[in-house]
Image (tube, rainbow, N blue to C red):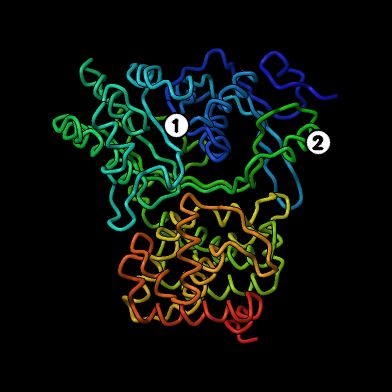
Amino acid sequence: MTIRLNQENLPLIGVEKPGYDRAALKGGIVHFGLGNFHRAHQAVCLDRLMNLGLGTDFAIVGAGVLPSDARMREVLAEQDYLYTVVEQSAGASRARVIGAMVDYLPAGDAGAIIARLAGPETRIASLTITEGGYFIDAATGHFDTAHPAIAADGSAPGTPKTVFGILVAALRARREAGLAPFTVMSCDNIPHNGRVTREAVVETARLSDPELAEWIAGNVAFPNAMVDRITPATSDRERGLVREDFGIADESPVFCEDFLQWVLEDHFPLGRPPLEEAGVAFVDDVTPWEMMKIRILNGGHAVIAYPSGLMDIHFVHEGMQNDLVRAFLDKVETEEIIPVVPPVPNTDLGAYFAKVSERCANPKIGDTIRRLCLDGSNRQPKFIVPTIADRLARGLGVEGLALESALWCRYCVGVTDSGATIEPNDPNWEHLTRVAQAAQADPGAWLAMAEIYGETGQNPAFAEPFARWLAMLGEVGTAATLRAYLGR
């Protein structure tokens, strides 16, 4: 029997579920970006906490500014904001209904979102708006105040359309009402996410109200965080599995690995939930953990992604089963990435990488190579290029990372080694495809993209192996090129 997921039917659901009174929860967190990662990460930690009888005044109120958010709100509202999380190890699947969300504000209704943020019950505004949602100019590494969406919010601060414009308007309202500001907590996978968010909010405010910008800079907390959990997209496959395996009719389940990590700087002037009781690590400076994760895990994802994509491999675990891809990952990580990752307190970097490999090889997750290949124009400057730059600055070689970059370029041509079309997989896909096609004859055209490579692309110690590997990929294909790199 399949049971429709909602509050009324919750007693009939045969998996773990909230053991707390959801009616007694108070929405103390307004969260932007109710995607799968947030629902499998931050919301799961809060649900764990609430099951201990803690943090019940920090329930989640959803907020969204994108058209796609409207559908998510509709689905979750029909389920009373309940949904199923299925945690999967290689040998087992465990389902739990999550109840930490109590509302989802109308998508795109800036007035409603600002009013909620401006209310005294809101103590934290959190974000998972993806790496590309921060309007970072890759050439400068700073917030792009000239972006049309941000410029529009600067010109019309009373009717903002972006997350940052909305946060500025809400902070202005709190200041005028004599209320202390909420904490702004980014949970996105970008280096120094708190610092990046601070710059975005402050500079958006500066466009219309420099005095407010200075007040925000001096009074609002933006803690940095490192977040980690592999969480694939939901499709009909996952909805079907929840029905078949657990008897739950859930239109928006989330499947994820059984690993979860959250390292967070403890800077919450208005208070916070005691998340340490749910496994969150609070530290003075998150930088070492952040760099470890971004370079070893996210950089490793890129190393797996592009050769697998070019060889028509669909799932990440299938990529890890391919001897060439797995050996490529092991060699690049151990010889080039890990040696320039700074030490992390109480952490063995080799053991961390071994865990990363185990997680990527988990066949239950169903994570796709296409997802790992997504949005390279935003991810490469954060996950790969800084390691290249560090190695070059130390006079170290970058053969493996140059090959990874060449594989990304070859992927962006838009055709796999078998001749299959690669559908657009980046916000800048058309531009990348034009440049990648030109680079087959002139490799320097690819490295000239300053928004990706900055000055690193012009360094001969990187440009030479990049050009050599790119030429080989065009001549003999991915498998043969990997064999050459591996000495096979």
Q: Return the residue at label 2.
A: 245
Mark sitting earlier along the chain (1/2): 1
Image quarter in which the N terminus is found: top right
Q: Tell us which disc is closer to us: 1 or 2.
A: 1
Task: Residue 478 in the image: state x and y as whole percent.
Answer: 63, 74
Q: Give the Cα separation between the discs numbered 1 and 2.
A: 31 Å
Q: Callout 1: helix, strand or loop?
A: strand
Task: Residue 189 in the image: state x and y as whole percent.
Answer: 45, 48
Left or right, 469 with reference to 242: left
- Which residue appears at 52% of the width and 48% of the height? 228
- Which residue appears at 37% of the width and 32% of the height? 163
Q: The disc labelled 2 sits on which kind of residue? A: Asp
Left or right, 244 with reference to 307: right
Q: Callout 2: helix, strand or loop?
A: helix
Viewer-proximal residue among 307 and 82: 307
Q: Return the residue at label 1.
A: 32
Q: Is residue 375 depicted above or below 348 in this figure? A: above
